[in-house]
Amino acid sequence: MVNYLLAIPPFPWFFSKTLLREAMAGRLPERVRTRPKTPLRTDPVLAQIRRAGNEPLKKIPLGADMDRYIDRSALMAPHAKMNQEQVSVNLRPYCLNIWLQSAQRIRYNMHAEASNG
């Protein structure tokens, strides 16, 4: 599916969510399907960090693969006193970590399925 989506020309299909809107024709009310995108009032990630703190991030173990990409001593967990840009920048290593872990699980599952086949 990823290869299919990467092969689709960005314009017009990704402009104004055209692909998604066309796929939902007949499944969503026209008023909902064709309404303009509504911007969020605040960044939901920043709001969550201000509300709950960064404890959930601290519970995610950093994989050994991360040492190839980051200096752990420079890692700073986003916190409530940061602005939106600072939160975004400091959240990137955590997102990379989650992505690397999920990619590793997918590779493991594909290997296991191939072995069972």
Image (spheres, rainbow, N blue to C red):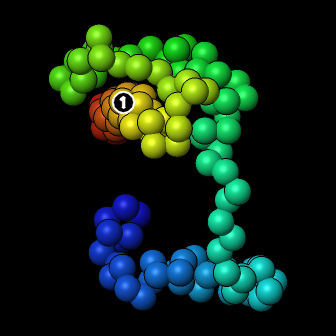
Q: What residue do we see at 30% from left, 17% from top?
A: 74
Q: What residue do we see at 69% from left, 86% from top?
A: 34
Q: Quadrant of the C terminus?
A: top left
Residue 1 visible in the snapshot: yes
Q: Where residue 52 sits in the image (x, y, percent)?
A: 70, 24
* As drawn, 117 above or below 2: above
Q: Quadrant of the N terminus?
A: bottom left
Q: Circle 1 is placed at which residue position? A: 93
Name the one closer to the observer, 41 or 3.
Answer: 41
Q: Residue furthest left?
A: 68
* As drawn, 90 above or below 9: above
* As drawn, 3 above or below 106: below
Secondary element at image label 1:
helix
Q: What residue do we see at 69% from left, 70% from top?
A: 38
* As drawn, 51 above or below 7: above
Name the one closer to the observer, 92 or 63.
Answer: 92
Q: Where residue 58 sits in the image (x, y, percent)?
A: 52, 14
- Which amino acid lies under the numbered mark 1 shown in the image of this protein? Pro
